[in-house]
Image (spheres, rainbow, N blue to C red):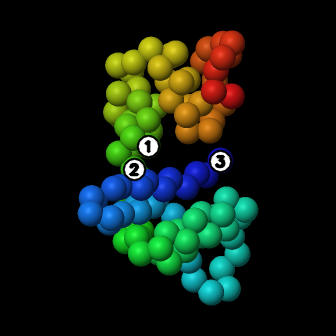
Amino acid sequence: MPSITITLIDRGQGKVSVHTDAVRPHIGASVTQAQGLAMELLGTSYKRGAEVIYSTDPAPAVALLRELLSPEGFGFAVTAEVRDRAREVLGMPRVETLMRRGSVR
């Protein structure tokens, strides 16, 4: 399931930067409910004077989580529990370990 990441950065002195990996909206494009909500949040941010930056690069934390799942990254260096926890945070189901009480999902 695709996800959209929005990161708010307080730059001090009342300035805020908003970074997102969402696709820049264009007229006539169909959007999912998540994309529509992200567009509303980003639009509100822009109207309130925040700098909104669209980038295809994922947020650093999301990039790390994906690297924990990748065999070319840290996938073989971490345990199955760590990989499944990364999956949970990314909105994916666990595939290697059982759900524990108090888990995210």
Q: Which residue is mark 2?
A: 59
Residue at 44 percent of width and 38 percent of height: 66
Residue at 34 percent of width and 33 percent of height: 73
Q: Secondary structure at mark 2?
A: loop
* Label 3 vs 1, first from the N-terminus: 3
Are the two marked residues, 2 and 1, in contact with CB atoms closer than 8 angstroms? yes
Nearest the viewer among 62 and 49 is 49
**Image coordinates for residue 98, horizontal then vertical, percent:** 67, 13
Q: Which residue is mark 1?
A: 62
Q: Which callout, 3 or 2, points to the residue nearer the camera?
A: 2
Nearest the viewer among 86 and 5 is 5
- In the rendered view, tell whether residue 9 sits above or below residue 16: above
How much space separates mark 2 and mark 1, taking CA atoms?
5 Å
Q: Quadrant of the C terminus?
A: top right
How much space separates mark 3 and mark 1, taking CA atoms?
14 Å
Query: Of the residues shown, which amino acid type is indicated by label 3?
Result: Met
